[in-house]
């Protein structure tokens, strides 16, 4: 049975699909059998990204399939080592089902209160619907250059009762261009940006390892040095 990780959000444009591709790419590079289950049928963002990746012949290949329901995706889980749910950008029963079926649920958010408040509201809704609080983690995405603002966002989320992944993803043209060419955030042309993305990817790997407590994750998962 696959380790299952979910990327969910209350609103679009906060980095949900970006994180799904990031973690999928890092595990695929370590020869894990990985699939992204794109559950946002109306947008199909990850599905279209994979088409661009194939067009540019970028390795490793990352399987992406669209599913209309969570239970459909779960039927193929035993064929993979890691299944990444890329959910639709809103709170719904489907979002709850995704989180309930996952070993780890990652909620990306920006730094503004307009981003943080709905993200926390979504987390509270998941907890209310039987998702263990320990299996929910936040990721700071599309941040600016202010360490104070980043730390304020971390404090806000921790005071709400949730953990926050180490690292953060800045808003960068190079990240957007990488995505346009079917590449993940660790595959840009700039080493410093790749390392910044690797830092957050490693934090997700570590969190998955903690929650699943499997030797497979600790021994075969992506090995990155974290500052």
Image (cartoon, rainbow, N blue to C red):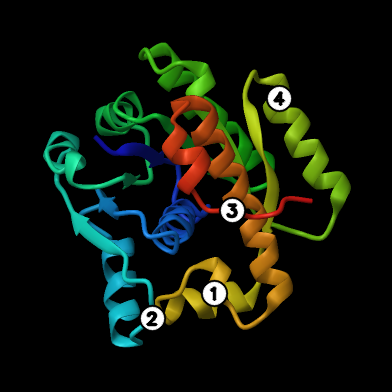
Q: Quadrant of residue 156?
A: top right
Residue 58 numbered tag: 2
Q: Position of residue 106 (x, y in %)?
A: 49, 38
Q: Tell me the residue that label 4 is attached to.
A: 158
Quarter holding the N terminus is: top left
Is the residue 126 above or below the residue 66 in the image? above
* Other-residue count near label 4 (Cα within 10 Å), few / some / many at <14 / 14–19 / ≥20: few
* Other-residue count near label 1 (Cα within 10 Å), few / some / many at <14 / 14–19 / ≥20: many
Is residue 131 visible in the rendered image? The answer is: yes
Label 3 to label 1, Cα distance in Å? 16 Å
Query: Is label 1 in a helix, a strand or a loop?
Result: helix
Residue drawn at point x = 42 percent, y = 12 percent: 128
Q: Nearer the viewer, mark 4 or mark 2?
A: 2
Label 1 to label 4, Cα distance in Å? 31 Å
* Other-residue count near label 2 (Cα within 10 Å), few / some / many at <14 / 14–19 / ≥20: some
Residue drawn at point x = 37 percent, y = 60 percent: 31
Q: Nearer the viewer, mark 2 or mark 3?
A: 3
Is the residue 198 above or below the residue 179 in the image? above
Q: Position of residue 12 (x, y in %)?
A: 44, 51
Q: Tell me the residue that label 1 is attached to.
A: 187
Image position of 67 (left or right of 4): left
Residue drawn at point x = 60 percent, y = 32 percent: 117
Query: Is label 3 in a helix, a strand or a loop?
Result: loop
Q: Earlier in the sequence, mark 1 or mark 4?
A: 4
Label 2 to label 1, Cα distance in Å? 10 Å
Label 4 to label 3, Cα distance in Å? 27 Å
Q: Earlier in the sequence, mark 3 or mark 1?
A: 1
Q: Tell me the residue that label 3 is attached to.
A: 223
Q: Position of residue 166 (x, y in %)?
A: 70, 42
- Front residue of 66/4: it is 4
- Front residue of 99/91: it is 99
Label 4 to label 2, Cα distance in Å? 38 Å
């Amino acid at each position: 049975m696959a380790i299952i990780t979910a990327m969910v959000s209350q609103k679009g444009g906060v980095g949900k699909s970006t994180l799904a591709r990031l973690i999928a790419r890092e595990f695929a590079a370590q020869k894990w059998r990985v699939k992204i289950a794109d559950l946002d049928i109306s947008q199909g963002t990850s599905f279209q990204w994979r088409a661009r990746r194939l067009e540019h012949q970028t390795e490793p290949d990352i399987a992406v399939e669209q599913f209309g329901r969570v239970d459909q995706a779960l039927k193929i889980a035993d064929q993979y080592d890691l299944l990444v749910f890329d959910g639709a950008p809103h709170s719904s029963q489907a979002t709850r089902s995704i989180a309930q079926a996952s070993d780890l649920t990652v909620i990306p958010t920006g730094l503004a209160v307009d981003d943080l408040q709905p993200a926390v509201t979504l987390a509270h809704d998941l907890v209310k619907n039987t998702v263990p609080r320990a299996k929910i983690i936040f990721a700071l995405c599309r941040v600016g250059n202010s360490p104070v603002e980043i730390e304020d966002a971390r404090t806000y989320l921790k005071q709400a009762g949730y953990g926050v992944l180490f690292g953060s993803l800045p808003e960068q043209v190079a990240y957007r261009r990488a995505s346009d060419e079917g590449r993940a955030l660790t595959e840009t042309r700039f080493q410093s940006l790749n390392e910044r993305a690797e830092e957050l990817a490693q934090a997700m790997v570590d969190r998955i390892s903690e929650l699943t407590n499997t030797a497979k994750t600790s021994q075969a998962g992506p090995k990155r040095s974290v500052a």
